[in-house]
């Protein structure tokens, strides 16, 4: 009796994110984002407001991770064959655009404060900045044990690490103002924090745009995909290759392989599947042809020997 086949209607995803820890970090980050915003407003510190803007971006990223985990549980249907996974990418694109706006406002406000320095309550500034660093270190400790496995957890860990660096910068500015009275440290620190926001925003928008444009993922080489397919015994030619990302952690591929020997087809399918899995491509669709479809496209459409075979992903046991 042949072993049961994997359910090919379920799309392959990366390992699940640690949802309880992500929720805890989201709550901590969200609460302290409000504390920093209020503290920055009361103390007159632009650096605290900039760091609150950075934390706002991370609240969005953490909420997006949780939302993605929930959306991934919704099954695909006859109208949305990939389910609702692309909502993650659309939300990330909007999030990145909003970050550009926040960073731009911070830079303009910082320039005005350099020209016209504002009084700052250094004691409140220092206390809020120190508390922010403590909160970020707690969040890092919550995610540290799992950031190496899950894509969502890894992204959240990097966001929180950026928050911690922002808190260090705000704390340094507060210390300088408290000890020397040099208030220009505040707008200068806020400009550095806005640059940190811009780096994250640009990366987020670039990755989102690449996915929406169905570009080849940066960690995948299309020539390497072709080389590995040609290395499978029985394959004489490869054409019409496409590799794209459906959503973060889910890479798909389709292509045509010329396999003149009909008896070799089952082995070729297994071989291509194994090679693609080694490249991190889990959703593979291959059309096998006995002649080069580029030259015989019209004839092959009517040949019974030319078929379309879908390769399901392998589930870990």
Image (spheres, rainbow, N blue to C red):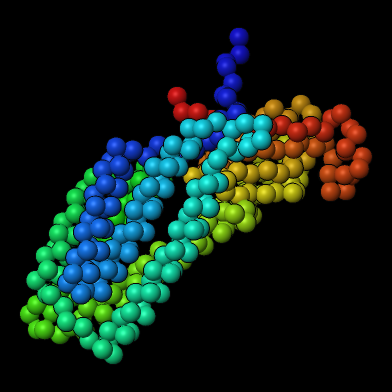
Q: Is residue 6 left or right of residue 163?
A: right
Q: Is residue 122 left or right of residue 139?
A: left
Q: Is residue 59 left or right of residue 212?
A: left
Res 130 → quadrant? bottom left
Q: Is residue 145 visible?
A: no
Q: Residue at x 40, y 45 (%)?
A: 65
Q: Quadrant of the C terminus?
A: top left
Camera-side residue of 61 and 255: 61
Q: Residue at x 74, y 49 (%)?
A: 240
Q: Residue at x 48, y 64 (%)?
A: 97
Question: Residue 47 placed where, x, y %?
Answer: 25, 72
What is the count of numbered marks? Answer: 0
Question: Residue 206 placed where, x, y %?
Answer: 52, 62
* Residue, far bottom: 115
Q: Is residue 97 visible?
A: yes
Camera-side residue of 38 and 193: 38
Question: Residue 25 placed where, x, y %?
Answer: 27, 47
Q: Residue at x 60, y 38 (%)?
A: 82
Res 54 → quadrant? bottom left
Res 163 → quadrant? bottom left
* Residue, far top: 1
Question: Residue 69 placed where, x, y %?
Answer: 43, 38
Camera-side residue of 280 and 231: 280
Q: Is residue 276 above or below residue 136?
A: above
Q: Is residue 305 above or below residue 102?
A: above
């Amino acid at each position: 009796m042949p072993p049961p086949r994997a359910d090919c209607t379920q799309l392959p995803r990366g390992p699940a994110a640690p949802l309880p820890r992500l929720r805890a970090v989201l709550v901590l980050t969200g609460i302290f984002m409000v504390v920093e915003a209020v503290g920055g407003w009361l103390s007159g510190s632009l650096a605290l407001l900039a760091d609150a803007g950075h934390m706002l971006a991370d609240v969005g990223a953490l909420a997006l991770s949780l939302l993605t985990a929930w959306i991934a549980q919704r099954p695909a249907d006859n109208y949305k064959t990939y389910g609702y996974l692309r909502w993650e990418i659309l939300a990330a694109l909007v999030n990145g655009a909003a970050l550009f706006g926040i960073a731009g406002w911070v830079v303009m406000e910082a320039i005005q404060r350099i020209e016209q320095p504002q009084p700052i309550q250094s004691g409140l500034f220092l206390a809020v900045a120190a508390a922010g660093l403590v909160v970020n270190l707690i969040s890092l400790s919550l995610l540290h044990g799992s950031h190496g496995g899950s894509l969502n957890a890894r992204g959240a860990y990097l966001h929180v690490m950026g928050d911690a660096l922002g808190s260090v910068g705000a704390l340094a500015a507060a210390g300088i103002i408290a000890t020397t009275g040099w208030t220009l440290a505040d707008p200068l620190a806020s400009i550095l924090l806005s640059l940190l926001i811009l780096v994250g925003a640009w990366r987020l928008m670039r990755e989102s745009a690449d996915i929406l444009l169905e570009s080849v993922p940066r960690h995948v080489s299309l020539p390497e995909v072709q080389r590995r397919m040609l290395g499978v015994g029985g394959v004489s030619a490869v054409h019409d290759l496409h590799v794209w990302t459906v959503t973060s952690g889910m890479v798909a591929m389709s292509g045509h392989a010329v396999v003149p020997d009909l008896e070799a087809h089952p082995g070729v399918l297994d071989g291509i599947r194994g090679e693609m899995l080694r490249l991190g491509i889990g959703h593979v669709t291959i059309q096998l042809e006995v002649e080069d479809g580029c030259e015989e496209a019209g004839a092959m459409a009517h040949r019974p020997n030319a078929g379309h075979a879908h390769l399901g992903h392998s589930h870990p046991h």
